[in-house]
Image (tube, rainbow, N blue to C red):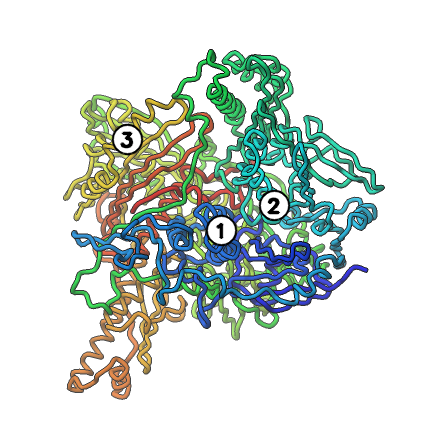
Amino acid sequence: MAATKLVFFVNGRKSEVPCPDPEMTLLQYIRRNLKLTGTKLGCAEGGCGACTVMLSRYDPSEDRIHHYSVNACLAPLCSMHGLAVTTVEGIGSLSTRLHPVQEKLASAHGSQCGFCTPGFVMSMYTLLRNHPEPTLQHLETAFDGNLCRCTGYRAIIDGYRPFTKGCCSKGENCCMNGAANRNENLSDGLRRNAEQNCVDMPDGKAVYDPTQEPIFPPYLKTEGKQLHYQSLQFRTDRVTWYRPTSLTELLDIKKRHPACKFVIGNTEIGIEIKFKGQLYPALVAATHVPELLTVEHTDSGIRFGSSVTLATLETVLKKAVDDLPEFKTRVFSAVVEMLQWFAGYQIRNVAALGGNIMTASPISDLNPLLLACGATVQVISTDGTVRELIMDSSFFTGYRKTAVKPHEILLSVFIPFTRPNEYFYGFKQANRKEDDISIVNAGIRVVMGNYVTVQDIALAFGGMAPMTVMATQTRNALVGQKWNEELLSKACETLAKDLPLSEEAPGGMIQYRRSLTVSFFFKAYLDILRRLHAQNLAPDIPLQSSYLSATQPMERDLPRGTQVYESVTPDQPAEDALHRPLVHQSAYKQTSGEAVYVDDMPLVEGEVYMGCVLSIKAHARLVRVDPSQALAMEGVLDYISHLDVPGSNIWGSGEEVFASKEVTYQGQPIGVVLAESQALARRAAAAVVVEYEPLDTIISIKEAINKDSYFAPLHAIARGDITSGFAASDHVVEGEIHIEAQEHFYMETNATICRPGEDGEMEIFASTQNPTQAQVTVAKALDVPQHKILVRVKRLGGGFGGKETRSAALIIPSAVAARKTKRAVRCMLDRDEDMIISGTRHPFLGRYRVGFTSEGKILALELDLYANVGSSLDLSIGVMDRALFHADNCYNIPNVTTKGWLCKTNIPPTTAFRGFGGPQSMIVAEAWIAHVASCLNMAPEKLREINFYKEGDLTHFNQKLEQVTLQRCWQECTEMSNFDLRRQKVDQFNSENRWRKRGLAILPTKFGLSFTKLDMNQGGALVHIYTDGSVLVSHGGVEMGQGLHTKMIQIASRVLAVAPSRVLISENSTNTVPNTTPTAASMSSDIYGQAVKEACETLRERLDKHQKACGDVVASWEELVKSAYLARVNLSASGFFIVPDLGYDFATNSGNPFAYFTYGVACSEVEVDCLTGDHRVMQTDIVMDVGKSLNPTIDVGQIEGGFVQGYGMMMLEQYKVRPDGTLLTRSFFVVAGLRNDDAGAV
């Protein structure tokens, strides 16, 4: 009889769950039931790694324990039977002792916002449990399922490099030799922080001692056999979970439930349930059926049971590749290579080979290889009949369909050996190669006959049809043909006929996808020809040496770098923390999982969850909204709409809290549903019926231009005489460039908890960069004074501008719901919800006309900037103003006319994002610089230098430039990067390689510091000294990973002359520092640093005065504070700072919009595969003037993270919207992974 109680261990403690819910994930259980909130929810689809935990399983047949990392957001709770779960809390804590993987990551500055950090910690921990001395390759593989949006990855790898075998790269200077320290003082007052390699623990012990790990729970070993071979059945009123332990039992379940779904890793079914709202009444865990888990070696290949995981598949094939002759394992090698790019490590640990086949995805990375190699599968029907199918052109019969019949089960997959004359290749092209869905992939097998003629050939492609397809016409045309250029031409011709991708095919990029099929074949053609030449079998067939690089893989190394920054002066006291590289204030809490974010807070009595009802139309009238089905669900409490808003339903720049009559973008809130659980709230929200009457929709900038759809105002800046400027020019060029949107992808989605109090009060915990905006908008919606609204922010899991205003779209509805029901309301958006609600970086179109002399001096610039601002203005006026101010970048142009057009469309309101319009405008500037350089046949770097601003120059908005360090940054970057020598090497490489090319570029930036809205340039702070000498600092800034609190502590530490450990910044709250400016525009350290400084100076003056009055007899800080208190000295002070000398008038083009400018220069070398568009960044050198850094390692981390984010914007990330306004890109695939951050020096 099947067991009905789930038994497993979490962090060494036994958990017994009677009748568990088959729809509950492990993450939900450990966070809500066990209150272990260190493990985070980032994407809910197994792509970001924030939810990584370690599972340990005892295998009775081998009498050994297996450790493997998994995504807890996908792992079904029911699948935990007999397993031991280890979370970040289970390996170390601040109250006991941090584990080395926690301590090293924090001390290497590898944690900024910290939301992804527990996932990295657990991936590394699992790696060490399996490989106590891992290689760098192990390190790379372990993290290919983890994302970080803040750091740029270098610091993370540096933190974990000491654990690897054979480090270090420093030779005799290695810190293990005891003579050198990883921080090196340079003669010019700079400090170099090189790769942090072999660093001993403080007590002299090794970095990691595996003997100190917790033991595996003895119960799971003594009862292991019973637990492992125990059939399970867990039932709710919606779903039944079965775990059979024999093939007979499995077939019986299939016979009784023909429509049941098999679950191995839940990597496909879990996503369908979560994001597509699918309900599968019968789920079958086919993970414990011995016949499905076998690995059988035969004389002709290897047979794998259909439930064998991809990780096991990779291990077995790797061993075969190592043990067998190369010619026998060419298919195996291709599969192993492809598995490097197949999902993340956590997914491969649980996803099964059979699941990949039966899912029948048209972009599966493995299916083209299986078709091309002629793999065979065994299937068994419910009556026990076994048959064998060849995976050929008839195996996949349609979209998500195979030749396996509905009453059959996939039993095994056989992958054959290759012969000496048989060649095999796998190819994949994706935006982000690792852990990303393919654009096109392929498997190519060629059997060579006598006289280098094709005996047989198989070509299978994914991404070219609704299913994986084989190019049969091409096969027929090439069999019997000699392997030469004539065959190549014929292949190119017939492939186009074989794969007739229509212009309307989903996914777009039609011409690119078509070209990839030819490029893949060409690569295979060249490599086979290379092999034939090596065997002297085709001496008469030409093969140019310059073509050979096309056959080489695009290798990507782990990120590493060197950081050079200004050191403190020798006379600075050791206890003075300012300007020193202190570790982020919360880093150790973040690595141990003890840092608290909004959704980590404990539930209070009566708290309910909120689910959002969002528009699915970009522009439409609301005909009917009917929540009756949702309200009929047991556990659903209420539906909230615009009718329930007690005050104003309008916030921001005219947006509705809840749409009342019309929706103007997909994702616009229509209402919310309150329920007793998070899952129920989301199901209930989906059950609300909304009927629409569609209206005309505008999506793109060019549509808005054509339909004259703009918001006011139209701001413009003019300097000089544009007409005479063009008249004096020898040449004039014009053109345009489009800059796409960018998703913020902060790791923590928008979250809020609203708790109603007495007499209309409301306490709000929110993930927002702008607590005062939340206070003001909620007060307006609830029709209460602002003093009744308290907003508290502890920390954010990333923001990047995306939480400056758009968080209000979640906070206000939550507050309205809490007010109506008089119950606490909690909501944390799903990743896809957040991406469709919250807005993006502004897409821009720049149209330019540039006049210049033959010597390269730019005389005139006429520029129109168009921004897609979406359905409301939000912050777009400020974004466009900053774009206009940065239209010149670093170039002094005497005659300029710029205009900024705010395009009104039906996408979600676009909003603030790192740089706030500046990056888009500077990209346009560099586009016309490149255009001019091309016209003059001049090196772009020379053209830039000719037109650089100099000290005392006026900008096009008539601000005088002072302390211009542009030329110094340029010179230092040029020298540091060895630009001239590398230019020669790049030119040489390009002359020697036809299909691989390298590019080298160096670019400057000038960025203005201040809010362009005058009243925002202010900030306050409040400092308390308690009688024990401890100090509490409050200020208006929000900590979101940028180290703001750490810097404020350093300032307070210096002014008060106390150790940083005495100073605490607990949170940002509107009842301590009122009327705060949003944490944005790179201004918070300036504004709040000055405010903290002023408050601390006031306190220091009072204490100094008291000490003097006491005759300087008070010996210690504690005694001084105690004495001052007894003397009734005020130990609390506020500080306030206003940025001086600001104010700009567009009408007169006068005044200063910025307090000062910062300058930077970056040089990057990139290699591009001309056949596929694949690329790698080989090296980047950055010189950035940040003034006198308050904390250099924090600032270096910001620079590195900003660079990788910008790299993602330009090269990897995509924002795709259908003409009807539907967002297509709403997952983790949009951001850069670890292997995309190739190299860098700052």
Residue 1233, placed above or below residue 241 = above
**Residue picked out by circle 2:** 312
Q: Quadrant of residue 1178?
A: top left
Horizontal side of residue 737 vs 1119, given as left or right? right
Horizontal side of residue 1121 vs 127, given as left or right? left
The label nearer to you, 3 versus 2, is 2
**Residue 695 place in picture, x, y as percent:** 58, 38
Tell which of 1111 and 880 is nearer to you. Answer: 1111
Name which of mark 3 and mark 1 comes first in the sequence: 1
**Residue 869 place in picture, x, y as percent:** 43, 42
Horizontal side of residue 1205 vs 823, given as left or right? left
Tell which of 378 and 861 is nearer to you. Answer: 378
Residue 959, placed above or below residue 474 = below
Name which of mark 2 and mark 1 comes first in the sequence: 2
Q: Residues within 10 Å of mark 1 (few under 14, many from 20)?
A: some
* Residue furthest right in the image: 383
Q: Residue at x 61, y 66 (%)?
A: 217
Tell which of 786 and 988 is nearer to you. Answer: 988
The label nearer to you, 2 versus 1, is 2
Q: Secondary structure at mark 3?
A: helix
Q: CA distance from mark 3 to mark 2?
A: 53 Å
**Residue 199 place in picture, x, y as percent:** 35, 58
Asked if the residue at tag 1 contacts the one at tag 3, i.e. Cβ–Cβ closer than 8 Å, the answer is no
**Residue picked out by circle 1:** 655
Q: CA distance from mark 2 to mark 1?
A: 53 Å
